[in-house]
Amino acid sequence: MAHKVSDECIKCGACAGTCPVGCISEGDKKYEVDASACVDCGACEGACPTGAIKPE
């Protein structure tokens, strides 16, 4: 199960810096998780200051 970034994302980039497999990238309106590469470790979820990242 991958994680998903909601519209609460403020594009701070904290999640991308904590992803051990580098599957988070900056999108047009928010950061996005590449579900096919996500290992569901939850590191991004804990790093997000707004709580915008949740398990899908």
Image (cartoon, rainbow, N blue to C red):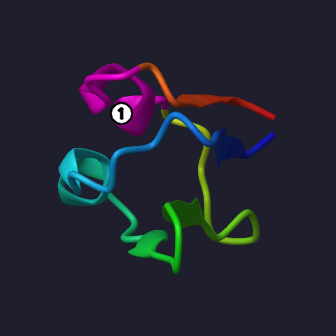
Alpha-carbon neighbours of circle 1 within 10 Å: few (<14), some, or many (≥20)?
A: some
Residue at (37% x, 71% y) in the render = 22
- Determine whether 43 is above or below 29 in the image: above
Q: Which residues are magenta?
A: 42-50
The number of callouts visible is 1
Side of 25 relative to 15 (left or right): right
Residue 46's spot in the image, x, y percent? 33, 21
Identify residue for label 1. 43
Question: Could you tell me which quadrant the C terminus lies in?
Answer: top right
Task: Give the side of residue 31 with respect to residue 40, left or right.
Answer: left
**Residue 33 percent location from the top left of the image:** 59, 62
Three-letter residue code for mark 1: Ala
Question: Which residue occupies the foreground of this view, 36 or 30?
Answer: 30
Dot 1: element: helix
Question: Residue 24 vs residue 4: left or right?
Answer: left
Q: Quadrant of residue 36?
A: bottom right
Residue 16, x across and y down, in percent: 29, 59
Of the pair 15 and 36, the residue shown nearer to us: 15
Q: Nearer the viewer, residue 50 or 4?
A: 50
Does the magenta-highlighted stretch encompass residue 13? no
**Quarter of the image with the N terminus in it:** top right
Relative to residue 40, is residue 10 drawn left or right? left
Point out residue 15 in the picture as x, y percentages from the top left corner.
31, 47
- Residue at 48% over, 29% down: 42
Magenta-drawn stretch contains 43: yes
Is 52 situated above or below 21? above
